[in-house]
Image (cartoon, coloured by chain):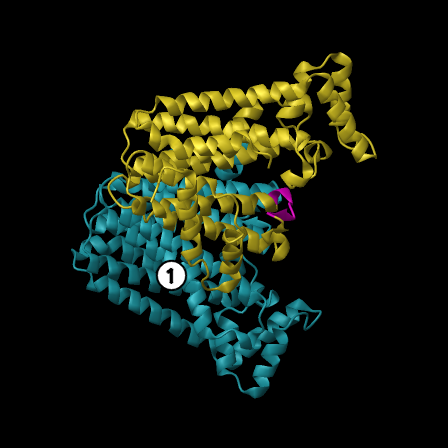
Chain colours: A yellow, B cyan
């Protein structure tokens, strides 16, 4: 069996989730958990965790608990985020607070968080403390990132600096990808310096991933991306796109952009999206954002190259990076 | 310094919380956590944990992280429970979802849960895995207990059996007291048999504690108890009192009790409370409940007596039990 490809680890994760039992009693508590964990998704975090473990020659069976744990934790954060953001749909299906109710979303979410610990605790060996500390500090950062995201919602466009935005997406998105990689490496017993390089690879990968998500909202093909273009503009979301555009604008353009992203600036939402996209076009935003993304990918590349293991073993992580570079959804 | 008294451990916990820093950034996330953890309360769980650790000759400094962790976890459950139960007050102060908002209650609660793990992870030594497994299985049971409690709210009086009710309060209340004791003993490196006996002591203590809470709602002195007598009756809460009363009633009395505990049975709430209490009186409920409580205390006593350590070391736990036996609030 060739393990030097991404699909091997992804298939392993799929099997892991297919075989795991998530139902329990009381069913009112566990049915939403089972529903959430069976909705699918890209399973990027556990796939990264297993690939990182293999990169340093770790035993696969020793990393399976942590793989289940990191994905269960990720899905817990989505469940509570959807409640807080009032998002009715996730992966095309009704979210838990819609399908059941708000209390169910709170308590089933809490229980998923506890279950993620049960899985993490399956990790054998003396390295457990370091693995759990990484998992926990990651969790705290994800919570802080979500709070910062909610804070930005209440602020005006000029009150959110690009540096703050990047710090927010680092905590909300990148640290969990980086944490998954680090945990996989720790379970394999990798040297501290290599663990640190892999973590930084994950941070840059995560930032690139989120910036790409922002870009796709403005320039994605609706049919492929699965979301309507310009939703962030309709929602006045202060993503990297308008924040970076503001830096590139002249005074008149900046005034228009601010007006567009102020609440209820126009009754015709489609006209609002068209005007914002025209402004982005006028300042050459797309190329700028693509440059920022390419820069993060290049830094990720550099971190990965610096890791001293057989280059062949890096293939799965390179494949993942390449699939993200070209992604249209 | 005499350590063979409860006050020593309580003072130690008070100092621990006074000296710990709970604030952080973003302040929107941490201010509600600091507020919640500084509201006070009886701090029973960390006090039990430290006393249990000392019972088996454990080092106090090695148990302080777990003491902070167990109380932080307990306060996290109160925070989310108050949100789910729509309780506006806790310890005489507005609850987090009232003072801030619902999203803050969700996310600050999640973060408190993560912080409780950070504290638990301060526990040194090789016994960490067992300590964390106990903490986590306890957390899962508390979630299951809360779900069962919410399920009971939706059911009629005849659909909740006493056995189910006792199982619910065991999970929602007793296992956390028992878990605190067990964790303290594990940190001290106590033998497995003794750990198990102390755990069972905690279960009986917790059941007695909750049954007493139920009793105080019907028979407590409002001025001392701090809550209005009969609130559970007004809320149609199917506690041990009405469930046990139903077993003691004749057919006519049972019909009246069921009618009283059905929704909106009368417009005059005070008359409803009076009628329920009169029914309780007629079937001799108070003595029956007191007997059930005394029985749990006796079983707790028995478990504690069976533990083979110097009797003097048990004084703090006996003091706690006695303070609970006579409690009026």
Using the rendered image of the protein, determine whether residue A104 is visible from the camera's viewpoint. Answer: yes
Judged from this view, the residue extending furthest toward the bottom is B251
Percent of width and height locating residue A175: 46, 32
Which quarter of the figure has residue B308? bottom left
Which quarter of the figure has residue B237? bottom right
Judged from this view, the residue extending furthest toward the front is A1
User: What residue is at 37 percent from the left and 33 percent from the top?
Assistant: A182
Q: Is residue A21 above or below residue A77?
A: below
Is residue A85 shown in magenta?
yes
Q: Is residue A177 left or right of residue B49?
A: right
Is residue A66 shown in magenta?
no
Which quarter of the figure has residue B201? bottom left
Using the rendered image of the protein, determine whether residue B329 is visible from the camera's viewpoint. Answer: no
Provide the secondary structure element on which disc 1 rests. Answer: helix
Q: Nearer the viewer, residue A138 or A209?
A: A209
Q: Which residue is mark 1?
A: B206
Marks counted in the figure total 1
**Quarter that holds the N terminus of chain B:** top left
Q: Is residue A142 left or right of residue B8?
A: right
Q: Residues in magenta?
A: A84-91
Q: Is residue A253 left or right of residue A112?
A: right
Q: Is residue A171 above or below residue B143?
A: above
């Amino acid at each position: 069996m060739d393990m030097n490809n991404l699909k091997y680890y992804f298939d392993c994760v799929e099997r892991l989730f297919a075989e795991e039992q998530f139902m329990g009693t009381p069913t009112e508590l566990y049915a939403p958990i089972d529903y959430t964990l069976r909705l699918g998704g890209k399973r990027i975090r556990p796939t990264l965790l297993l690939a990182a473990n293999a990169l340093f020659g770790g035993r696969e069976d020793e990393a399976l608990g942590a793989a289940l744990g990191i994905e269960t934790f990720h899905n817990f954060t989505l469940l509570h985020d959807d409640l807080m953001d009032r998002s009715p749909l996730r992966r095309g299906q009704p979210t838990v607070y819609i399908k059941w109710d708000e209390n169910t979303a709170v308590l089933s979410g809490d229980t998923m968080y506890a279950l993620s610990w049960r899985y993490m605790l399956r990790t054998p060996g003396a390295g457990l403390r370091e693995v759990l500390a990484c998992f926990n500090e990651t969790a705290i950062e994800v919570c802080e990132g979500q709070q910062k995201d909610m804070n930005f919602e209440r602020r005006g466009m000029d009150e959110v600096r690009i540096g703050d935005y990047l710090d927010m997406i680092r905590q909300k998105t990148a640290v969990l990808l980086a944490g998954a990689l680090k945990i996989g490496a720790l379970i394999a017993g990798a040297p501290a310096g290599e663990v640190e390089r892999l973590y930084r690879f994950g941070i840059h990968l995560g930032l690139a991933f989120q910036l790409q998500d922002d870009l796709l909202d403005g320039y994605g093909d609706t049919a492929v991306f699965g979301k309507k273009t310009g939703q962030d503009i309709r929602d006045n979301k202060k993503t990297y796109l308008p924040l970076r555009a503001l830096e590139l604008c002249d005074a008149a353009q900046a005034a228009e952009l601010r007006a567009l992203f102020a609440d209820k600036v126009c009754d015709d939402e489609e006209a609002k999206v068209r005007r914002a996209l025209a402004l982005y076009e006028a300042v050459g935003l797309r190329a700028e954002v693509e440059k920022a993304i390419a820069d993060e990918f290049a830094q990720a590349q550099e971190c990965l190259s610096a890791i001293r293991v057989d280059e062949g073993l890096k293939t799965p992580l390179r494949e993942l990076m390449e699939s993200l570079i070209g992604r249209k959804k």
